[in-house]
Image (tube, helix red, strand yellow):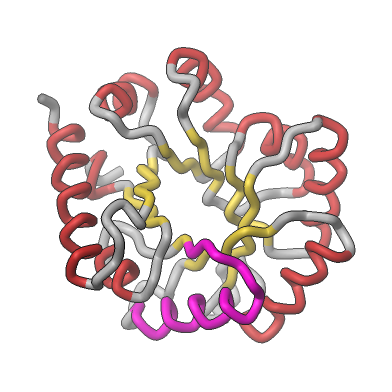
Amino acid sequence: MGDAVQQFFAVKARIAAAEREAAREADAVTLVAVSKTFDAADIQPVIEAGQRVFGENRVQEAQGKWPELKDAFPDIELHLIGPLQSNKAKEAVALFDVIETIDREKIAAELAKEIIRQGRAPKLYVQVNTGSEPQKAGIEPREAVAFVARCRDVHGLAIEGLMCIPPADENPGPHFALLEKLAREAGVAKLSMGMSGDYETAIAFGATSVRVGSAIFGSR
């Protein structure tokens, strides 16, 4: 059994323990295995070990490896977890099952157009910049609830969740608490939060999915 497979099972066990600790239902939290920068040969053993939900940061990189893997394993669910340029909306809608990084009007409009054109409806999340970091993607927290409403009412998008990446040098707990509060106010059920270093904390704050890469595949 390869390192990534062993680490995958270890992460699954830690998620289950964190669910119990937080008095959450078993399997309440979906593991999104973040496979960015790893090639199909690295990813396939983890698929064969039972993992079916994966995350990628870049549309172009994902196009190079996932169509073939999805043909071989049709029940794969692929998440886009990196920033989306509006000129990549067409490719993103064609390839991804979940797009987690809607953060501005232009992207919402382009996705709405492509969803109608392609007749394909990926699940959609709004990314919130909980730390208001100027270099980071995501909508400002104070604008998030109104933006979700505009995505629905103006663009006809069925937003089902919120996503965040807390500042690296801060306690993630308050950021996770903020995202959970915004999700309640916006009327969305899903919370994508928590990565390799803090996913157990995120589970305690109500995460419905965690995005774990280096703890499974190793450092990049």
Q: Would residue 163 appear left or right of 177 to someone viewing this image?
A: right
Is 64 or 162 nearer to us in this picture?
A: 162
Is 215 or 148 nearer to us in this picture?
A: 148
The N terminus lies in which quarter of the figure?
Answer: top left
The answer to whether 94 is drawn above or below residue 210 in the figure is: above
The C terminus lies in which quarter of the figure?
Answer: top left
Instruction: Give percent across and percent down for residue 157.
Output: 77, 55
Q: Would residue 78 appear left or right of 140 to someone viewing this image?
A: left
Residue drawn at x 51%, y 45% is 57
The answer to whether 194 is drawn above or below residue 50 in the figure is: below
Q: Would residue 12 appear left or right of 95 to someone viewing this image?
A: left
Tally the marks: 0
Is 162 or 91 nearer to us in this picture?
A: 162
Residue drawn at x 43%, y 82% is 177
Instruction: Give percent across and percent down for residue 38.
Output: 36, 32
SS majority, magenta: helix
Give the magenta range: 172-191
Task: Classify residue 88 by image quadrant.
Answer: top right
The answer to whether 17 is drawn above or below residue 218 in the figure is: below
Residue 188 in magenta stretch? yes
Residue drawn at x 35%, y 77% is 172
Instruction: Give percent across and percent down for residue 130.
Output: 52, 78
Residue drawn at x 42%, y 39% is 54
